[in-house]
Image (spheres, rainbow, N blue to C red):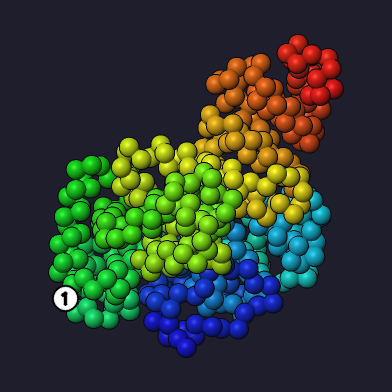
Amino acid sequence: MVGVGGEPLFPQLPVVWGVPWSRNPNFTGRSGELDALRDRFTGGSATAVVLPQALHGLGGVGKTQLVVEYAYRHALDYDLVWWISAEQPALVVAALAALAARVDVAVPGEAQESADAVVQLLRRRDRVARWLVIADNASAPSDLAGLLTAAGGGGHVLITSRDPAWTQIARTVEVDVLSRAEAVVLLHARAPRLTVSEANQIAELLGDLPLALEQAGAWLASSGMSAVDYADAVEHRTREILAEGTPVGYPVPVAATWTIAIDGLDDPVAVMLLRLWAFLGPEPIPTDLIGPAAVPVLPPELAALAGAPLARGRVIRRITRLGMVRLVEQSVVMHRLVQTVLRDHTPTTDRDDIRRTVHAVLAAASPVEPADPASWARYAQLYPHALATNLVDSDDQDARTVVTRLVTYLLSAGDYPNSHALAQHTYQRQQHTLGEDHPSTITAAAHLAVTLWALGDYAGARTMHEDVLARRRRIRGEDHPHTI
């Protein structure tokens, strides 16, 4: 079976393969970018010293799909291909630690040491001579936990980011929208009934942006709407969105496309679920967040869904058919562009309630023993959403408990820098909102002291521990369990 570009969809894969995306059968164009990437990596020689390559561009321009296609197209040129969701430093460490476990160099219970070990393995290139690590959706430039220093020769690092500042430490490639001809081919692949004229008109309205074209094609293929009605609706929604304000950096036609889809969804429960997902982070969202544990904290409509796996599956399947989320194993991925549009589209009177519900759902999904390695996989799923939803700023006691557990998880897993950063933010926030002597503030200070000790700041840890002890003696008394 081949895709639009004639490449086999299911090539043979290397022994160590960690790409969570399936190959896109509708991938179109980008031959120039793909060829340039390969030339830059090889330099005409298998031993050439090369810089990491960083693709940057607008959200939705197709950076991730481009690197997925590169990985599949050149799978047999590597012995190891691994994927990192690189938005947060903790996710980089966790992904490298997972790779360390895969190649048998992990240090049990020590995420950072495991990450360091696998970076050293990649740098030596004795056991693995040819490797590719993809760091997707990286934020500000960094060394990616030391990974960049391991690149060169047969070891390649490929980065996607919206930040063009990666040019400081990597060779950057700006990814632009598709050409009009490629945009038309992509629309035809998704919605074959379109005429060339109709496809041209829709591509013009959507600014040739790949993500928007994918969604538009899916909508036209499944909704029965005519191309003329679709174009009219996009223009109408565009005027409406412009009147309300356009998300910074996001093309208006994309926003119009997604609001049309949600307005046409005659299923209030599906709309509620989409909006809840929109208020989470852009990392994979476990579908079982809306499960039995969340029933007590959900509105009645979603609570009924959470208690019925088959009904939940039907709603998720309906949503995925809209092209607004993608299923990745037992998680859904909603592009940050879609999330922004849906958050802005949510009635202002509902937004605070949804944020509170999201925090409550994260709390319900939080295992009670964060130091237990059996719970770490779950906390790795929850952590990026806790950050994205500003859980640390919540005034709810259950939310504070989750943040404390996240600090303990990161510390127990060996990720000391991120544990310290979260503990420090938590302590500063609770100092400001609750005061120095509130029990939650004192608990946060105790956790911060532990993270300082883990980082080797023994003097700072001792000073903070003594302060915590003094305040507990004064407030709780000598015989209180916390004081003891």
Q: Secondary structure at mark 1?
A: helix
Q: Label 1, on which residue?
A: 197
Q: Position of residue 148 (x, y in %)?
A: 64, 55
Residue pictured at 76% horizontal, 52% vertical: 373
What amino acid is found at the position of numbered circle 1 in the picture? Ser
Residue pictured at 49% horizontal, 75% vertical: 23
Q: Position of residue 330 (x, y in %)?
A: 56, 64
Q: Can I make out residue 162 in this image?
A: no
Q: Can I make out residue 353 in this image?
A: yes
Q: Position of residue 398 (x, y in %)?
A: 59, 35
Q: Position of residue 170 (x, y in %)?
A: 54, 55
As drawn, is 256 to the left or to the right of 406? left
Residue 371 in which image quadrant: top right
| Quadrant housing the C terminus | top right
As drawn, is 420 to the left or to the right of 469? left
In this rendering, is residue 410 above or below 302?
Answer: above
Residue pictured at 38% horizontal, 58% vertical: 270
In this rendering, is residue 434 above or below 147?
Answer: above
As drawn, is 265 to the left or to the right of 120? left
Residue pictured at 52% horizontal, 63% vertical: 309
- Count residues near mark 1 (Cα–Cα under 10 Å), then give few for <14, some for 14-19, many for 20+: few
Q: Residue furthest bottom?
A: 1
